Amino acid sequence: MMKVAEIIRAFPMLAFVVGEKWLQQEQPWVEDYVPPRLVWYEQLENDLTLISEKIERQNLIRPYRSGLRDPNGAQKTMLEVHGSALLAAAAISIQLHVSRGDDSGRNFDILVTIDDFTVNAECKTRKDDFPFNLPRQDGGETGITGYFGKRATVDPHDAAMLGLPATRHESNVASKETPESTTIRQIMVDAQSQLPESGINLILFGHIEGDREQLERALFGAEVLTFYKDTERSKIVSTEWSLTPTGAFDAGQAGEPFRSISGVLWFRLYKAGNLVRSYKLYCNPGATYPIPEAVVAILERLMSEWTINLA
């Protein structure tokens, strides 16, 4: 098992950001926490080094020190660093933790200049545990032990507005009325409140756990299957899939509050032997300030280069 001295030698940028003295003072915790997560810390070291090539390394302390010192927040901070590193790799220049520019006192994570365009970005993370955040069920009539639950696909308020029928849940199955897409839209609202009101605004969405389709439902609406019936013959004659007009990037009323968001850059890091990396950029077709094609091309190229699939 690695000792603190070895960790400091292996990860000098990490040691600089969190402080060598702190690492030594927290020796029991550090030696227990870091070694099982070496691939994460190797990625973090690379990301911090990359960012430091575009900014004085002293400027890394204020935004990242407290998060990386906290075992409960370290993973979220690692994802924030990674998202910023991706933008930094594409950028001519960067600034970290930039003031929103008004009297709100808020700031956003990173401002970058890419191909002479200024891009503001705020990183948010999401860990969706469903159904493992529900009580464990033992046996029962099926004899199967595990975690079971049902969750709405369309928000009940949206369903009522669209005239969609409510779904009745079995009394013995735990259910959640708030769909994951609604939770993600709320996260987007929070990110939006930290970004400037104008300019190219990007949300970096670090997905710790969960299904990327839930993000797509938040952006573009949930899938609905419509059955067309011949009433005279009481027979279904056709079906059609469509999306509910509830997404943040919808062209209609649902998308109006999100016009200041130019896009969402989704990414996920997870350990599967080595560290697997995945990315996808979603541009808002109704954005007041769309992401320029040149910036999209640069980001798409970088995401392709940085992607690491399962072996």
Image (tube, rainbow, N blue to C red):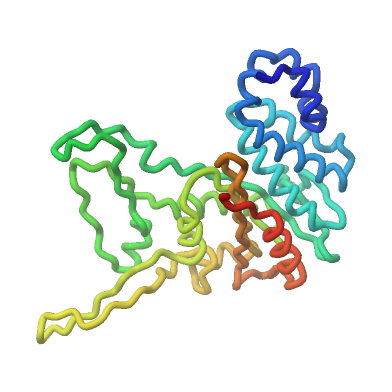
- Could you tell whether 145 is left or right of 98 in the image? left
Residue 270 location, x and y as percent? 57, 43
Q: Position of residue 71 (x, y in %)?
A: 61, 26
What residue is drawn where x is 54% and y is 49%? 187
Residue most extreme to the left = 233
Quarter of the image for residue 229 reads bottom left
Which residue is farthest right?
56
What's the residue at 66%, 70% (across, down)? 288
Q: How many marks?
A: 0
Q: Quadrant of the N terminus?
A: top right
**Front in this rendered view, residue 100 or 310:** 310
**Is 274 on the left or on the right of 218, as rendered?**
right
Residue 102: tell me if it is visible: no
Residue placed most toward the observer, 220 or 209: 209
Residue 151 in sight from this viewpoint: yes
Q: Is residue 155 above or below residue 164?
A: above
Residue 307 sits above or below residue 96 on the image = below
Where residue 145 sits, quadrant-wise, is top left
Q: Position of residue 281 (x, y in %)?
A: 62, 62
At a point 71% along the width and 36% down the height, the residue shown is 42
Relative side of 271 to 131, left or right:
right
Give how far across and how far down residue 241 sits, in percent. Answer: 35, 74
| Residue ID at (18%, 43%) | 171
Up-down: is 226 above or below 16?
Answer: below
Where, by quadrant of the figure, is residue 173 drawn? top left
Q: Residue furthest bottom?
A: 232
